[in-house]
Image (cartoon, coloured by chain):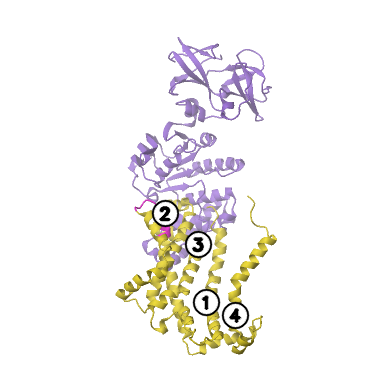
Amino acid sequence: MKRLTGAGPGRWLAVVVLIVVAGFPVYWMLNTALATREELFSGQSLWPRVDRIVSVFDVFDSDVPLMRWLTNSAIVASGTTFFSLALAVLAGYGLSRYRRFHGRGLVGFALFATQMLPEALLIVPLYTLFVSLGLINGLFGLVLADTAFAMPVAAWIIKSAVDGVPYEIEEAARVDGAPRFVIFSQVTLPLVAPSVAAAAVITFFDGWNEYLFASTFIRDSTKWPASKGLSSFIGEFITPLSTVFSAALVFTVPAIVFFLLVQRRIVSGLTSGSVKG
Amino acid sequence: MPAIAFRGIRKSYGDTPVIHEFSTEIPDREFLVLLGPSGCGKSTMLRMIAGLIDITGGDLLFDGQRVNDLEPKQRNVAFVFQSYALYPHKTVRANIAFPLLMSRFRWWQHIPVVGMVERWRAMRDPAITTRIEQIAATMELTPYLDRRPRTLSGGQRQRVALARALVREPSIYLLDEPLSNLDAKLRAQMRTEITALHRRVGASFVYVTHDQVEAMTMGTRIILLNDGVVQQSGTPQEVYDEPANTFVARFIGSPAMNLLPVTVRDGQAAIDGGTTVPAGGVPDGTALLGVRAEKVRVAATGSGLPARVAVVERLGAETVVGFRLGLADNSEELGAAAMRDLHYAKVPGDAGLAVDDECRVLLDLSGACWFDSHSGARIGARKDGRVA
């Protein structure tokens, strides 16, 4: 079969279209964030005024607690990533390697089934549950709710990766005298690190983009994550577009930094992980 | 170094038997080869010895001690896998060191940072570094110690796998088709190296292969399996000279032993309905006469059974001639059908024959075997005889 490595005009066109579709909102956000209020109404330049980039940070001087909201988002995203990965690596490994426990298929399906239900469907029972557990109006409740939805995806990604690690490598470690947890932590886990990194990106963005649960469970505006905080800019009569887009730009920076930190790991792992033992 | 005893060992998955019950004893320091075609259960047997899979029934004993329920680590075995099973994310040095680090492992090393520091310290321990360097020098791996397995050739990876097995001086080495991924030249070289290694370390080796050349050249004892049933156990010469049945006769030796259908009456066996040879001790009826290819002589003219040449394989020092008894023309059939009724002679130098030539065949019956034509089992003892 011919490998799709060529760079024909059709492929180039497809790539350009994808870049435009994905990049236009980013461009629009940047351009609007760097425009003055007058320019927004009189017609702004097509080229973003990069010389005004420092003015974006003026948004921190406004009367909204943006820094607090960003910190809340970071706590929710980090917590979701931590709990999701901690559970997902164990679940993924167990589903892949322990093939003889009863209900294995059911567990796998149940994890998958969580993705079939929209979050909005579960919000009422979750609200009732969180009220009885005292988790309403707290960031930990958001972390738990997001973990419940992000963990199954991460578990399936990691399970698929563990499936790809030759079982003989683990058998070799057993013969070498390694305890079961050492085999998991020192042999298998490093080999699936690229998939763990990919799962980390997905779970982090699940937490970072958290909006629905925050709107429902958090009453205190100082405990909002940034996504919910940004939406509060939208007023009934007026929306300060430049400020909203400046805040949005600031909001995207930590997510981009996180992605850049782990993406190298994902790309390098695609080759090293595939090498047969 | 322990002797290995199999007492009524068997293995099954559910109701499906994989290894049928068998018993045998292997003295210590033997080079035992588990031989058989793909899927016969030899790797399963090796994994049972290693403790990687459960034994369904019977007892496995090392030096008289039952080891069925012991973990691989407690059995003090080393395992070399067909795919090498090196740790791809560790350097060659770390791969070789891993069994040594695990022998020092204590529960508190599960604590992440503590475990990491302890591993770092252990890798700088002179006892470990010296041992790694010794083994690396023995296996000619010193220049590659800081490289990762993916940067090594197949032969070098194989040596790393052997080094990892050697480093903690186990009592039994288990090798699962370790040469099957190598090219022919490297395989011959590694065959010699592993045999030398066996002599040097003085431990018991159990070696799985489907290659009867490896079994004959390396083993001091062979267990031959087919469909989970042990067909024969013995020294390579015993298995070659006195095959227990037609499966063993055909599996061992290249080319396979010739099995000629004969009709026996009153101690005389008629080959191809004509020439008779003495068949003392063989009951009347149909039987199979087994003659090795090197005991068959073919010539273009002279006395002997008439035959037609079907295959000529020139190997330089010798020639393998495939023929069919009788003077019927060769068929145009391909595949398995082309091999039917084909017998072989191995003659020194050039036989001076070509495909489709008529020839005469002489059988040297010294060392010939007789087999029951129904069960395939060998009849009686080896017969000495004269040239037919």
> Badge 1 is on which residue?
A254
Mark 1 → mark 3, Cα distance in angstroms: 21 Å
Please give the label number shown on residue A16.
none
- The chain to which mark 3 is attached is A
Please give the label number shown on residue A195.
3
Mark 1 → mark 4, Cα distance in angstroms: 15 Å
Report if the CB atoms under discs 2 and 1 are less than 8 Å apart.
no
Q: Given this view, does label 2 or label 4 mark the residue nearer the observer?
A: 4
Q: Are marks 2 and 1 on the same chain?
A: yes
Look at the image and give the residue range highlighted in magenta.
A91-102
Left or right: A266, with B373 as reference point? right
Chain depicted in yellow:
A
Number of other residues with Cα within 10 Å of mark 2, as a class: few under 14, some 14 to 19, many 20 or more: few
Number of other residues with Cα within 10 Å of mark 4, as a class: few under 14, some 14 to 19, many 20 or more: many
* Three-letter residue code for mark 3: Ser
Mark 2 → mark 4, Cα distance in angstroms: 47 Å
Which secondary structure lies at badge 3?
helix
Q: Quadrant of the C terminus of chain B?
A: top right
Please give the label number shown on residue A97.
2
Residue B222 in the image, given as x and y percentages of width and height = 46, 34
Chain depicted in purple:
B
* Three-letter residue code for mark 2: Arg
Residue B334, image quadrant: top right
- The chain to which mark 2 is attached is A
